[in-house]
């Protein structure tokens, strides 16, 4: 086993300048092996995310074909893709559940990973979990700033700076489905993928790298320049609380509250107009940020070492790890998808 306490130091002489060669680096093989393992892991996770994207695109066609087989006739409004509003949300809900649930389950089966290992639900103090929820929501609120800056920049440059949203009607049942599709389903299945499979896969290379790396992939996956910075900063908070609490329900709660607030503001605009909706949003924004700051103080004082991350037993630098996170077969394809999707979204 390599002795990390006494690193190799080449002999010095005035006529010779050391140059890093294979034979002079006793850790060369270990570094190469770690790079190989990281590249293989990152590629597998990227292919899993690409399978999610593929299923999100392909499943609606499969479901449409099935509906035609059973004699369904398209009579809905154009904004609902020809479906009735109820059927639109049912189809989209099934698509989202299957597209996000099947790839990570397949990934775990191929890697022979126990479900309880990838999806942690460790017991944690209620006060700690609640503080983490407040912390996460505070970060999500502040993450709106870079998203708004990106939106303003794109609109200034003459491109589309809006975020796609689901259609609505005045029927309470449709509005309930709207909330479920925006807040409940994504909170469950996206956490399964990103704070479950992705975060777990990267943690062997260091918790800090896993937090930032999973947030980076979370942002790329959205394929929208407006959502990318928002998803990245939210992803940092979500991954951090899962690492520190060992409980996926904490990140699910944050995800649900953040998306639920967005859905609530949209419904408030529907019934009461922009003035009241904006006022309520500002109140909620301020409250969550203040609670987030209070939670940081509480966790720093009452949970000693809470913000400390253990240094990984790794021979790779942070830069080398992030290069391997992207520069691998699956990572390059995922990055290409992100770039193409961002370009298309700007031009819509």
Image (cartoon, helix red, strand yellow):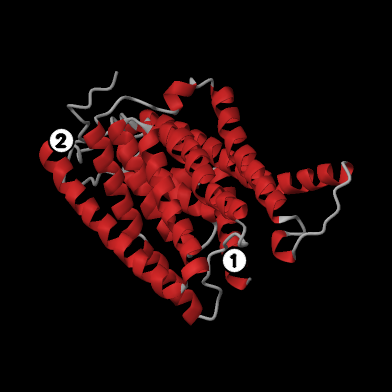
Ranked by sequence position, the earlier of labels 2 and 1 is 2
Task: Name the residue nearer the viewer: 237 or 134.
Answer: 134
Return the residue at label 1.
Answer: 345
Mark 2 crowdedness (10 Å alpha carbons): few <14, some 14-19, many ≥20: few
Q: Mark 2 sits on what residue? A: 303
Q: Nearer the viewer, mark 2 or mark 1?
A: 2
| Position of residue 54 measured from the top left corner of the image (x, y, whole percent) | 67, 46
In the image, is 305 to the left or to the right of 246? left
Quarter of the figure with the C terminus: bottom right
The percent position of residue 79, horizontal first and vertical second, equals: 69, 64
User: Going by the image, does 106 lie left or right of 323?
Assistant: right
In-image side of 222 versus 142 (left or right): right
Q: Quadrant of residue 71?
A: top right
Rounded to the nearest angstrom, the CA distance separating label 2 from label 1 is 43 Å
Query: Eyeballing the image, is 343 above or below 42?
Result: below
Residue drawn at (24%, 47%) of the image: 17
Mark number for residue 261? none
Residue 12: horizontal and vertical position, in percent? 17, 40
Secondary structure state at the residue bearing disc 1: helix
Is 270 located above or below residue 171 in the figure? below
Question: Taking the image as drawn, is residue 60 in sight?
Answer: yes
Residue drawn at x 29%, y 18% is: 1
Residue at the top extreme of this rendering: 1
Q: Residue furthest left?
A: 301
Query: In the image, is residue 259 above or below residue 308?
Result: below
């Amino acid at each position: 086993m390599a002795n990390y306490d006494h690193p190799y130091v080449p002999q010095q002489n005035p006529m010779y300048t050391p140059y890093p060669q294979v034979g002079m680096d006793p850790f060369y093989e270990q570094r190469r092996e770690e790079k190989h393992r990281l590249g293989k892991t990152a590629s597998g996770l990227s292919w899993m995310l690409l399978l999610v994207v593929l299923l999100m695109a392909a499943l609606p066609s499969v479901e449409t074909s099935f509906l035609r087989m059973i004699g369904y006739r398209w009579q809905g409004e154009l904004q609902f893709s020809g479906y009735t509003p109820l059927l639109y949300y049912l189809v989209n809900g099934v698509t989202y559940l299957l597209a996000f649930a099947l790839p990570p389950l397949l990934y775990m089966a191929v890697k022979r990973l126990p479900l309880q290992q990838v999806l942690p639900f460790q017991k944690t103090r209620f006060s700690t979990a609640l503080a983490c929820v407040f912390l996460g929501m505070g970060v999500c609120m502040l993450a709106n700033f870079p998203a708004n800056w990106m939106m303003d920049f794109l609109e200034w440059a003459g491109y589309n700076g809006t975020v796609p949203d689901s259609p609505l009607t005045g029927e309470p049942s449709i509005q309930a489905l709207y909330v479920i599709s925006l807040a409940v389903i994504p909170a469950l299945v996206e956490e399964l993928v990103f704070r479950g499979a992705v975060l777990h896969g990267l943690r062997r290379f260091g918790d800090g790298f896993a937090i930032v790396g999973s947030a980076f992939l979370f942002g790329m996956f959205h394929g929208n320049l407006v959502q990318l910075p928002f998803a990245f900063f939210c992803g940092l908070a979500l991954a951090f609380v899962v690492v520190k609490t060992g409980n996926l329900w904490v990140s699910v709660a944050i995800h649900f509250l953040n998306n639920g607030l967005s859905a609530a503001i949209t419904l408030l605009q529907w019934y009461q107009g922009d003035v009241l909706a904006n006022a309520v949003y500002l109140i909620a924004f301020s409250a969550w940020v203040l609670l987030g700051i209070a939670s940081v103080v509480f966790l720093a004082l009452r949970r000693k070492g809470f913000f400390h991350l253990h240094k990984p037993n790794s021979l790779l630098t942070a830069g080398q790890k992030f290069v391997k996170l992207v520069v691998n077969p699956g990572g390059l394809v995922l990055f290409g998808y992100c770039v193409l999707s961002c370009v298309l979204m700007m031009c819509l």
